[in-house]
Amino acid sequence: QVQLVESGGGLVQAGDSLRLSCAAAGRTVKNYHLGWFRQAPGKEREFVAAITHRGSNTSYADSVKGRFTISGDNAKNTVYLQMTSLKPEDTAVYYCAAVFALSALSMRVQDYDFWGQGTQVTVSS
């Protein structure tokens, strides 16, 4: 089992920056890749970014490339999502998720095994 707890969401203005954190816990947490997804009202959950369990590879959705950066601190079992140049369309609940590391770094919701409770990000225009 892997437990994931997100934090860092809030209300910001367009153009602002925000950093989300995902604290992971569990006996086997180091065997999991970690990813960020988001879900806006009335829309399906979508991939944002992911990082391999050793931090050697990352993947991003086209909509956030160049604006968001995913990084990890293995000593703290924490993954971060640094978001810059935020836009109103980035408004969503952001979820942290874990997929077993024997799997490829996936962008698919259905591939992830564990999920956090989510943190709200609201970007005003």
Image: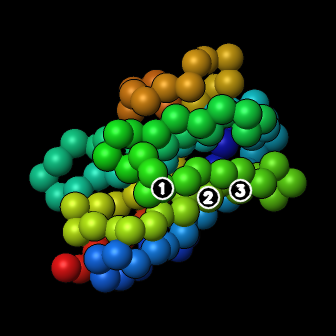
Q: Position of residue 22 (x, y in %)?
A: 61, 58
Location of mark 3 (residue): 78
Looking at this rendering, what residue extends furthest in the front direction? 66
Looking at this rendering, what residue extends furthest in the left direction? 42
The numbered mark at residue 86 is none
Q: Position of residue 82 (x, y in %)?
A: 54, 62
In space, the residues marked 2 and 3 are separated at their CA atoms by 7 Å
In this rendering, the answer to whether 48 lies above or below 110 is below
Location of mark 2 (residue): 80
Looking at this rendering, what residue extends furthest in the right direction? 75
Would residue 94 appear left or right of 112 to someone viewing this image? Answer: left
Asked whether residue 114 is in view, the answer is no
The numbered mark at residue 68 is 1
Which of these two is toward me, 96 or 65?
65
N-terminal of the two: label 2 or label 1? 1
SS category of the residue bearing label 3: strand
Would residue 1 appear left or right of 94 to someone viewing this image? Answer: right
* Residue drawn 31% across the image and 82% down it: 13
* Residue drawn 71% across the image and 51% down it: 72
SS category of the residue bearing label 2: strand
Which of these two is toward me, 57 or 54?
57
Instruction: Give, as a three-letter code, the residue at label 1.
Output: Phe
Which of these two is toward me, 97 or 81?
81
Q: The C terminus is located in which quarter? A: bottom left
